[in-house]
Amino acid sequence: MIFEQSVRREFRQMASSILLVLIAVLLTITLVRMLDRAVSGGIDPGDVLIFLLLSAASSVPQLLVLTAFLAVLLTMTRAFRDQEMAVWFSAGLSLLDWIKPLSRFLAPVLAVSLLFAWFIVPWTVAESERLQAQYSSRDESLQAAAGRFRESAGGRRVFFVGKTGEAGQFVEDLVVIQRGPHERTWVLAASGKLFTDPAGNRFLDLEQGRRFDLSWRPDNPDDLKAREMGFEHYGLLIRAAPSAMPSKPIKAIESYELILRSDSIAVGEMLRRIGQSLPLLLLPLLALGLVASNPRSGRAFHLLAGILIYTTYTSFSTVAEAQVSRGQWSLAGGLLGIHGSFACAIALLLWFRLGISVGLKR
């Protein structure tokens, strides 16, 4: 049918344009955030691109919801503004006839959203946590390439190694600068060797060197205190023994494992993953009723109203997920309380608009 083909084509074209703009904005904001984390020592500077892609992939469900919502909203606004809807209505069509092409447009988008929300996003979160833990637990002395100054994680230490040997376990001509809030420490050693004590603490045993300390009072920076000492052996703590294995974030748990769990935190995470795809079914329908109820309003009005509604909806969804995670609401309560109420409001809006249309035809 010409009507369905033209509507689906316009939905796809509008969604493609919106998605490209949203991806560009997302990548820009995420890149700035990743560079800031790399500068502060939170992640490896060499992994900025990987973290950028992982973070962007985890935001795909939200991008798809906003893209579909705005695509339908702007398409319907253009149809009313150009009097195209008057032509379709005069041909005997109603708003209900838009649901069929809309569902065919949303079907592949919904499939991609479910794939990301339940399978790809947990993997990206787990991979990000793995890379960050690997960088944080790496031996700081091995981060310093021979002949170059390198900052350790967090920027609290600066290493310089003249020469390395034994696969990085032995170093020569070592300089270490430690920075604190009100002190500075310089350690110079002719050589050093990595070792692990029985408790699991990782040390660098420095030999034949000197240590210089400089400290000052916070209220009087000019009041400096200096100290110098020499040593034959000096143990520099590289990494403390882990007290316990870090727990896996709930967002990184695989979906099949999440379904088997029955605790409130797992149920809240299930509601969050369901809530990432449900708006794909509700918000486009809201766009139909919203524009039909205000056909003479401009595109800017509908765009601002759509963004406000989207923000409000996602905010209430977050509140419901928090309540379920605390055990105060059940999964059914969270679904019906927010998404169910929103679906009822959309159904009433469409029913009201269809009733007005029938009255006008009579």
Image (cartoon, helix red, strand yellow):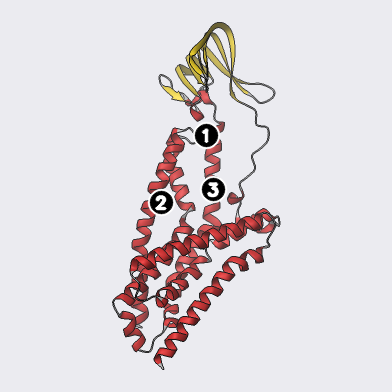
Residue at screen point 46% across, 23% down = 144
Q: In the rendered image, is residue 152 in sight?
A: yes
Q: Looking at the image, is 95 positioned above or below residue 175? A: below
The residue labelled by disc 1 is: 135
Report the disc number at residue 303: none
Tell me how many marks there are. 3
The residue labelled by disc 3 is: 125
Q: Quadrant of residue 109 in the image?
A: bottom left
Q: Residues within 10 Å of mark 3 (few under 14, many from 20)?
A: many
Q: Residues within 10 Å of mark 2 (few under 14, many from 20)?
A: some
Disc 3 to disc 2, C-alpha distance: 17 Å
The residue labelled by disc 2 is: 26
Secondary structure found at label 2: helix
Upstream in sequence: badge 2 or badge 1: 2
Secondary structure found at label 3: helix
Disc 3 to disc 1, C-alpha distance: 15 Å
Secondary structure found at label 1: helix
